[in-house]
Every structure is written in structure tokens, then in C-alpha cells.
Amino acid sequence: MSLGIKPWSRWSHSAARRFQEKIIWLEDCWLWIGLVWEQHNNLPLFWLKCWQRSARRVAWEMRHGLLSTDEVIQFICERPLCVNPAYAQERFGVAVEVIR
């Protein structure tokens, strides 16, 4: 399975490959097996250019393009380790479950 990365995205092929290696591809969910932030409900994290970023946000941006700093996404999948951007909703401002 592939993320379907936008050709104009800032993600290098090596970063995309590393990201995909940390996913178990199920029929409907992409389960994250990489780094998690245990103190934050096991929030999936991904190291990118010396920064820890939300793996959910990275998946969204790889698929749909970059989010601005005032945009947030809310995941509606019941599995806390799912990073499938199909289960995300773009929001402006504060969301119920903010993923930055």
C-alpha cells in the first residue's frame, strides 16, 4: 500500500519510505508501530528533520498537502494508533482532539 504522496509535497522519498515502514496496513486502518508519546494517550509520533511530529498530521500532509499553523486535524477513528488520513477532518482553530 502507498500513501499517495503529492508530487509537490516537501516530503522526501526517504522520509516517506521511513514513514511507511512504521505502518501495519489493515483493510481500513493504518496502524502505527513507530514511536508513541505515552503521556499523551499514545499519540503516534514521527521524527522528521530533527523534530517529533504527530504521525497523523504527517500522514495528512503527505496525502493532502501542508497545513498552516492555524489549521488542525481531528481523527475520528476509534483506534488510537490509526494514522489513515481518510479518518481525519480538517478544522480551523481548536478541535475536540487536536493533533499538531
Image (spheres, rainbow, N blue to C red):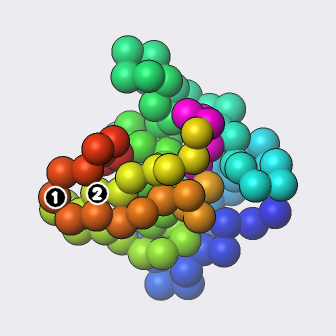
The kind of residue tagged 1 is: Gly
Residue at 55%, 80% in the rendered image: 6
Of residue 90 and residue 68, the one placed in the foreground of this image is 90
- Is residue 74 positioned above or below 79 on the image? below
- Give the dominant element type of the magenta stretch: helix, strand or loop: loop
Q: Quadrant of residue 52?
A: top left
Q: Could you tell which of marks 1 and 2 lies nearer the N-terminus?
A: 2
Residue 36's place in the image compared with 85, above or below, is above
Which residue is identified by label 2? 72
Percent position of residue 30, x then y: 70, 49
C-alpha gap between disc 1 and disc 2: 7 Å
Q: Position of residue 66 (x, y in %)?
A: 36, 71
Instruction: Name the residue: 55% across, 71% down.
Output: 63
Kind of element beneath mark 2: strand
Q: Position of residue 45 (x, y in %)?
A: 47, 36
Magenta residues (range): 79-83
Check disc 1: other Cα within 10 Å, few if <14, some if 14-19, many if 20+: few
Pinpoint residue 42: horizontal percent, then vertical percent. 49, 24
Q: Which quadrant of the figure has residue 28?
A: bottom right
Residue under label 1: 93
Left or right of 52 in this view: 3? right
- Tell whether 34 sits left or right of 26: left
Is residue 12 shown above or below 82? below
Q: Is residue 57 magenta?
A: no
In the rendered structure, are the residues bearing label 1 and label 2 in contact, judged by CB atoms less than 8 Å apart?
yes
Q: Is residue 34 left or right of residue 2?
A: left
Residue type (three-letter) at the residue carrying disc 2: Val
User: Element type at marker 1?
Assistant: loop
Quadrant of the drawing holding the N terminus: bottom right
- Figure disc tally: 2
